[in-house]
Image (spheres, rainbow, N blue to C red):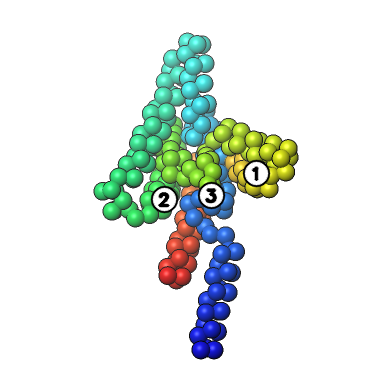
């Protein structure tokens, strides 16, 4: 009887320790930080090295499209259309991962999408410098939209790893509630969202510096960050299996 009590006590202590350890899932802050860095990084990369077109920020592309049309610069305007269409296609593909048939093939679609994004970014870095910029931006916009569509939750809150407008609104609303209502949950939400925004800014800054320094090969830095994100998910999966 004493032995049984001792075993149960040990199990209970392990469970309490595990509960305190932050789980790395597709909704975790750690993964969100990495993906936000990649989001800002890719926008800097494509804007600086691929003809002034954004990979993630389709709002920016649509605004620039309107400006170029208004200026009568039809050739420049057309450059902003393919990334928008590629983004739309990526969203549709991400939605297809939710179908029962696809779920049978990919039990963990988040990992499959990360692997696809990693492979595409590595391939982009291997392309010759003379390849048309539009081909590269279309491919990057496609995989960026997969990321945006697949990683949409930070714990229980909706967020975006590739654009900051919505995140900034949510963070500010939460900060207001935290200050005015002394709401601790809102303070935690504000802190996490401002962390994501700061990560995106860091990605944009580092992307700008490294793209200037490494040119086309700078895309591999983003791929390396996604490898880290994938390994985080893999590590968590092994821990979950060991618990079971």
Counting other residues with Cα less than 10 Å from the Cα at mark 2, is it few (<14), some (14-19), or many (20 or more)?
many
Taking the image as drawn, is residue 12 in sight?
yes
Q: Quadrant of the C terminus?
A: bottom left
Q: Earlier in the sequence, mark 1 or mark 2?
A: 2
The residue pinned by badge 3 equals 155
Taking the image as drawn, is residue 132 in sight?
no
Front residue of this view, candidates 137 and 234: 234
Counting other residues with Cα less than 10 Å from the Cα at mark 3, is it few (<14), some (14-19), or many (20 or more)?
few
Counting other residues with Cα less than 10 Å from the Cα at mark 1, is it few (<14), some (14-19), or many (20 or more)?
many
Left or right: residue 120 versus residue 191 is left
Percent from the top left, x then y, of residue 220? Answer: 49, 48
The residue pinned by badge 1 equals 186
Q: Which residue is depicted at the point 43% across and 35% down?
A: 141
- SS at badge 2: helix
Residue 48 in the image: above or below residue 17: above
Q: Nearer the viewer, mark 3 or mark 2?
A: 3
Q: Which residue is depicted at the point 58% across and 74% down?
A: 13
Quarter of the image where one finds residue 183:
top right
- SS at badge 1: helix
Which label is found at residue 160? none
Quarter of the image where one finds residue 168:
top right
Left or right: residue 243 versus residue 106 is right
- SS at badge 3: loop
The answer to whether the residue labelled 1 contacts the one labelled 2, judged by CB atoms less than 8 Å apart, is: no
Percent from the top left, x then y, of residue 164? Answer: 58, 35
The residue pinned by badge 2 equals 110
Q: Which residue is depicted at the point 31% across and 51% down?
A: 103
Percent from the top left, x then y, of residue 160? Answer: 52, 39
Front residue of this view, candidates 11 and 76: 11
Q: Nearer the viewer, mark 3 or mark 1?
A: 1
Question: Whole-Å distance between the Cαs marked 3 and 2?
Answer: 15 Å
């Amino acid at each position: 009887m004493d032995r049984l009590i001792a075993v149960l006590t040990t199990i209970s202590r392990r469970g309490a320790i595990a509960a305190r350890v932050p789980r790395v899932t597709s909704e975790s802050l750690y993964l969100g930080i990495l993906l936000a860095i990649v989001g800002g990084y890719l926008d800097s990369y494509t804007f600086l090295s691929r003809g002034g077109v954004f990979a993630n920020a389709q709002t920016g592309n649509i605004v620039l499209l309107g400006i170029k049309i208004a200026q009568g610069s039809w050739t420049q305007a057309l450059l902003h259309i393919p990334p928008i269409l590629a983004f739309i296609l990526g969203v549709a593909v991400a939605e297809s991962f939710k179908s029962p048939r696809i779920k049978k093939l990919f039990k963990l679609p988040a990992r499959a999408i990360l692997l696809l994004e990693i492979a595409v970014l590595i391939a982009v870095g291997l392309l010759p410098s003379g390849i048309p910029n539009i081909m590269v931006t279309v491919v990057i916009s496609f995989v960026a939209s997969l990321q945006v569509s697949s990683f949409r939750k930070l714990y229980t809150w909706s967020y975006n790893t590739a654009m900051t407008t919505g995140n900034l609104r949510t963070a500010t609303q939460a900060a207001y509630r935290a200050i005015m209502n002394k709401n601790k949950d809102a303070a935690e939400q504000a802190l996490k969202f401002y962390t994501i925004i700061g990560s995106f800014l860091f990605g944009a800054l580092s992307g700008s510096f490294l793209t200037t320094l490494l040119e086309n090969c700078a895309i591999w830095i983003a791929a390396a960050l996604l490898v880290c994100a994938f390994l985080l998910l893999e590590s968590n999966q092994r821990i979950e299996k060991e618990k079971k």
